[in-house]
Amino acid sequence: MAGKWELYTDKSGEYRFRLKAGNGEVIALSSEGYSSKSSALNGIDSIRRNADGEVVEVES
């Protein structure tokens, strides 16, 4: 089963999204809050367009 994006409103009425795997496990935690649904959908679209980036290991 394919993963899915969940778009929802939080307790303060802001739109947020998260990405869930096909088994229902959250694999990308909740986004920042957006005041409009269209802004949240734009955030999802931005991640989709930019997600094929380079993996960079950061040492601490």
Image (cartoon, helix red, strand yellow):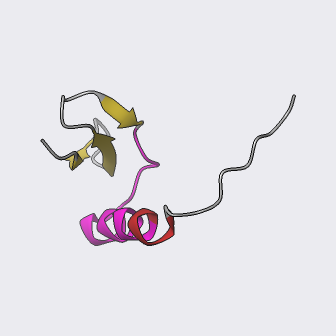
Say if 56 sits above or below 21 in the image: below
Residue depicted at 43% across the width and 47% down the height? 31
Is 38 in the magenta?
yes
| Residue for point 35% across, 62% down | 44
Q: Is residue 52 depicted above or below 3 in this figure?
A: below
Q: In the displayed structure, does residue 5 sit left or right of residue 27?
A: left
Q: Residue at x 31, y 44 (%)?
A: 19
Q: Position of residue 28 (x, y in %)?
A: 41, 39
Which corner quadrant holds the N terminus?
Answer: top left
Furthest-left residue in this view? 1
Q: Position of residue 16 (x, y in %)?
A: 33, 49
Q: Quadrant of residue 54?
A: bottom right
- In the picture, measured across the screen, residue 44 lies left or right of residue 37, that is right
Q: Is residue 45 left or right of residue 8?
A: right
First to last magenta residue range: 30-46
Residue sitting at x 76%, y 41%: 57
| Spot occupied by residue 48 in the image (x, y as percentages of width and height) | 39, 65
In depth, the one of 10 and 27 nearer the eye is 27
| Residue 17 is covered by the magenta coloring | no
Eyeballing the image, is 6 above or below 20?
Answer: below
| Number of numbered callouts drawn | 0
Camera-side residue of 29 and 3: 3
The picture places residue 3, in percent across and down from the top left corner, at: 22, 45
